Image: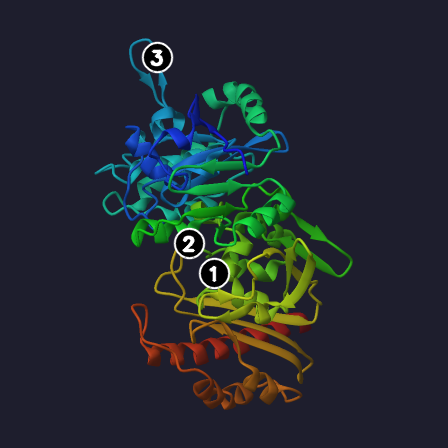
Amino acid sequence: MMKSSILKFLLNDRLVEIDFNKTSILPSTTVLNYLRMNRLVGTKEGCAEGDCGACTVTIAELENDKLVYKAVNSCLMFLSGLHGKQLITIEHLSENGVNHSLLHPVQEAMINHHASQCGFCTPGMTMMIFSKYKSKSNITPIQIRTALAGNLCRCTGYISILDAANEVLANRAPDVFSMQELEIVSILRQLNDGNSHFFNSENQCYYLPCTLKDALDFRISHPEAIIVNGATDTAINQNKQFECQKCFLDLSAVECLTKIEETEKEYVIGSGCTITSLKEFAAHNYQVMLPVLEVFASEQIRNVATVGGNLSTASPIGDLLPMFIALGAEIEIASLSGRRKISLEEFLTGYRTNALKTDEILTAVKLTKMSASRFCFFEKASVRKQLDITTVNIALCLDLDSIVKTIRLVFGGMAEMVKRVNVVEDFCHEKKWSKQLVTDCFPLIDSFFQPVTDARADASTRTILSKNLFLKAYIHSTLSMELEEV
């Protein structure tokens, strides 16, 4: 029987230890609810589903023995996921001076630029900008706008907020957190002892393994456990549907799953790789993926959501699924008896169901390196560009020299699962790539899909969108070929 662990993390500058056997708090209590229970009410609850950013906090964690600061939505993070990390809230940014509080430069900038009215969204905005303030890299105005896309403000307007952010991030200097960094690193190093942790309460168990072997052992002994790898989807179900799961297997601390490795012919992307890490990798090694990754949720969500988590939900509107299927991705799955590889298409078995057995864990995605001749087009149609759910998305990969040699066409949002349109691929094979060929495929698309009507679009809109996106892909391919000729 596993020995129950005590959850340990830094709450601002205070070490917190929680024995779930001695409290009514569940291991899956959200960080937001925990903060408000403890009167740290500067962190606000707006939507409780990661859409508004009012609950944004900053997490500092060790990477290569240095602190890395990341903004996250506290409403989508389980308390147990804080083990060995520092949680920083808006209350901790200012210092207590002799006669008054000394505001952090980010707070000063927000005040000086009148970047707050009602103040409800301001703490989340401030924490996002603070996270960027503590970044080691240069931050451009465009990157600031993208970072703030996960924070809604209904009254101030974004100009004053952007002005504050641009000013303070252009003039970064050591702050009180810089002076405390060595001390924080030392504390977190002690908390990250290399052990797996089992948080157990009367009504719930939560396992946080640090090795794949430990995770697979737990999978065998607890086949009913809900696997979380980022938890951004599971947390919404807990917040909105009031689901109370009895057992969790959290893979976020399994370091071997977070890596991206390169071989001669392919890239092996660990299932625990966050979307932020995948985006950084793509910027240098696989740029065709950037159109998808740049509009994947918000930065707060990208910082914790993982490749494996997104694929395993098998959502018909999942952002990564069409792209990876079009790229011919393979999935690596591990169990105690060995490993197996299947195509991503085989991995999807129906609406939000996948091919994982009760003793298995998704460990990696394998991508063949891109050939220079391949054309790829990935696009997501949604009501708004940033932080929105897909209405219809398309992924197209082509190899051609005026004649279609290979084609993979995939749509999301058109059926109960993401689907590859084999009838169109067969029809286009070895034909001249032209606008006429694309429009000749429209009846095939119409007959292949029977989309549904829901809150985002009616069925006829989806049908029109799918054909328009295919035509747009063709136009982009001709532009790409013209550029190559030049």
Question: Gap between marks 1 and 3, in whole Å?
Answer: 49 Å
Looking at the rendered image, the quarter that the C terminus falls into is bottom right
Q: Do the CB atoms of the residues marked 1 and 3 lie less than 8 Å apart?
A: no
- For disc 2, the marked residue is 233
Judging from the image, what secondary structure is the residue with disc 1 in?
loop
- For disc 3, the marked residue is 97
Residue most extreme to the front: 1
Does any portion of residue 486 appear in the rendered image? no
How many neighbours does mark 1 have within 10 angstroms: few (below 14), some (14-19), or many (20 or more)? some
Q: Nearer the viewer, residue 266 or 358?
A: 358
Question: Does 268 appear above or below 102?
Answer: below
Horizontal and vertical percent position of residue 457: 32, 72
Question: Gap between marks 3 and 2, in whole Å?
Answer: 42 Å
Q: Do the CB atoms of the residues marked 1 and 2 lie less than 8 Å apart?
A: yes
Q: Amino acid at mark 3?
A: Gly
- Mark toward the start of the polypeptide (3 vs 2): 3
**Residue at (44%, 77%) from the top-left corner?**
466
- For disc 1, the marked residue is 313
